[in-house]
Image: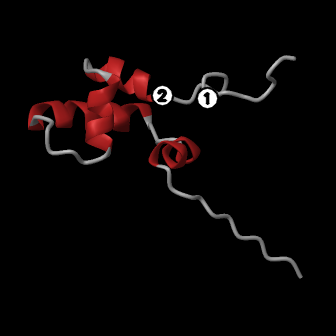
Amino acid sequence: MTDTRPSRRQHNVPTITDVAHKAGVSPMTVSRVINAKHTVREQTRVRVEAAIAELNYAPNAAARTLAGGEEMRIGLLHS
């Protein structure tokens, strides 16, 4: 059975790896910047934030929920 769901790659949406490559850092460093960890040097943080802005990167909400172990709730109103 073939997976037919669209991936972020198919829609040309930038990934954390794309941001890391553009900034010249590892994907983990990008993650630290996104999650506001204080273990990243200011110069590196600026480069990563510039790459995020240039690529128009936005974290995947569903992936963040899965990784964080938090619940994502969706409400539906029907009348």
Q: Amino acid at mark 2?
A: Thr
Q: Residue at x 34, y 17 (%)?
A: 21
| Image spot of residue 55 (x, y percent) | 42, 31
Is residue 60 left or right of 23 when viewed as pictured?
A: right
| Image spot of residue 49 (x, y percent) | 27, 38
Counting other residues with Cα less than 10 Å from the Cα at mark 2, is it few (<14), some (14-19), or many (20 or more)?
Answer: some
Is residue 74 left or right of 67 when viewed as pictured?
A: right
Quadrant (top left, top right, bottom left, bottom right) of the N terminus: top right
Task: Say how the picture is coloured.
Answer: secondary structure
Residue at the disc numbered 1: 8
| Image spot of residue 37 (x, y percent) | 21, 45
26 versus 32 height, above or below = above
Q: Residue at x 27, y 23 (%)?
A: 23
Counting other residues with Cα less than 10 Å from the Cα at mark 1, is it few (<14), some (14-19), or many (20 or more)?
Answer: few
Q: Residue at x 66, y 27 (%)?
A: 7
Q: Amino acid at mark 1?
A: Arg
The answer to the question of whether label 1 and label 2 lie on touching residues, with beta carbons closer than 8 A, is yes
2 or 8, nearer to the observer: 2
Real-space Cα separation, disc 1 to disc 2, in angstroms: 8 Å
Residue at the disc numbered 2: 15
User: What element does badge 2 sit on?
Assistant: loop
User: Could you tell which of marks 1 and 2 lies nearer the N-terminus?
Assistant: 1
Q: Residue at x 10, y 34 (%)?
A: 41
66 or 76, nearer to the observer: 66
Label disc, if present, on residue 46 of the rendered structure: none
The quadrant in which residue 11 appears is top right
Count of labels in the image: 2
